[in-house]
Image: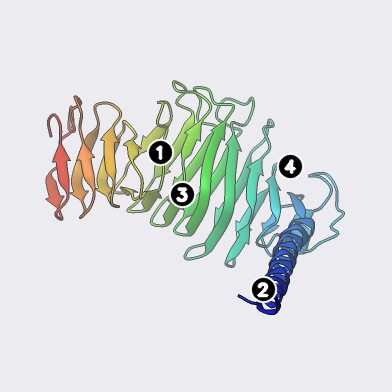
Amino acid sequence: MEVKDYLRKEKEFRSFSTQRKAVVACIALLISSISAFATTYYSRATGNWNANSTWSTVSFASATNAGTFPVAGDVVNIGGGFTVTVNVASACASITYEAAGRSNTVTLNSGIGLTVSGTITIPRATGGGTTNINLLAVGAGNLTAATLSYTSSGNRTRHRLTISTGTVTITGNITSNSNTNTSPLISFTGAGTLNVGGSMFSGGGGTLTQSTSTVNYNGGGAQTIGAFTYYNLTLTGNSTKSLRAATNVSNTLTVNAGATLSLSTFTLGATTRPTSTVLYCGAVTGSTI
């Protein structure tokens, strides 16, 4: 290679390297700008999600709202004893309930969707027996979130997720701060669906009331099935789903193609056996159904 060609190629390489660094810097600046423009909201009145009067950008007790209402990327705090109704398709980065001695509620209208790109945190409301409740009422709506975290748990169910005929999709884990406390409640009152991409109370604790619901473990990686009584239990995704302990299904067990149900040494149907088992080319290994 001649010196002239070498120098030309070296110049081209340096130019490309400079351009690449500039692109990386622009991307970093864009991400930083998006984060900088995120707004933190507090519920300050009972009202609709898309009403400015429902929100404060200062505190639960303040009427000051320097923004409008939460949108994708914004941080949402629910408290003050108020009920926020999701009346239009809505989104935010996270939702955190206050742990205070009063009831705080987010309720979804029928057919309306709420997308939370991060974590929904529901601490147990303090005091008042079962009067004070932090409630996420999906009803016949549609909720999607990355993770659902129950905190400050105990034995009285003062933090609840309720579903009638709607759909909840948690792409990651459903967790509790305790492996024994039963206060974290997921309650169905109809034929709703819960899709779980990670684990659900994998260490124990929590309460599930089934009605005529379907719980679908649909993660692409290995999953641990919570030890509850399910109405319909569906397993989806190219991975192994393992029982944590003896588990019951009162209606239909479905193992879809690519999924493997690992019973290990546990029994599925220890006290309540499924009335039907459907294997769409899925597999069951281990102990007893």
Mark 1 surroundings: few (<14), some (14-19) or many (≥20) residues within 10 A: many
The tally of labels here is 4
Q: Nearer the viewer, residue 251 or 221?
A: 221
* Amino acid marked by disc 4: Gly
Please report contact status of discs 1 and 2: CB closer than 8 Å, yes or no. Answer: no
Q: Nearer the viewer, residue 7 or 285?
A: 7
> CA separation, marks 4 and 1?
31 Å
Left or right: 244 with respect to 279? right
The label on residue 6 is 2
Q: Specify the label residue 19 is tagged with.
A: none
Q: The disc labelled 2 sits on which kind of residue?
A: Tyr
User: Tag 2, which secondary structure?
Assistant: helix
**Marks 4,3: beta carbons within 8 A:** no
Give the mark nearest the N terminus, 1 or 2: 2
Q: Which mark is residue 199?
A: 1
Identify the mark nearer the N-term, 4 or 3.
4
**138 shown above or below 24:** above
Q: Which mark is residue 170?
A: 3
Residue type for callout 3: Ile
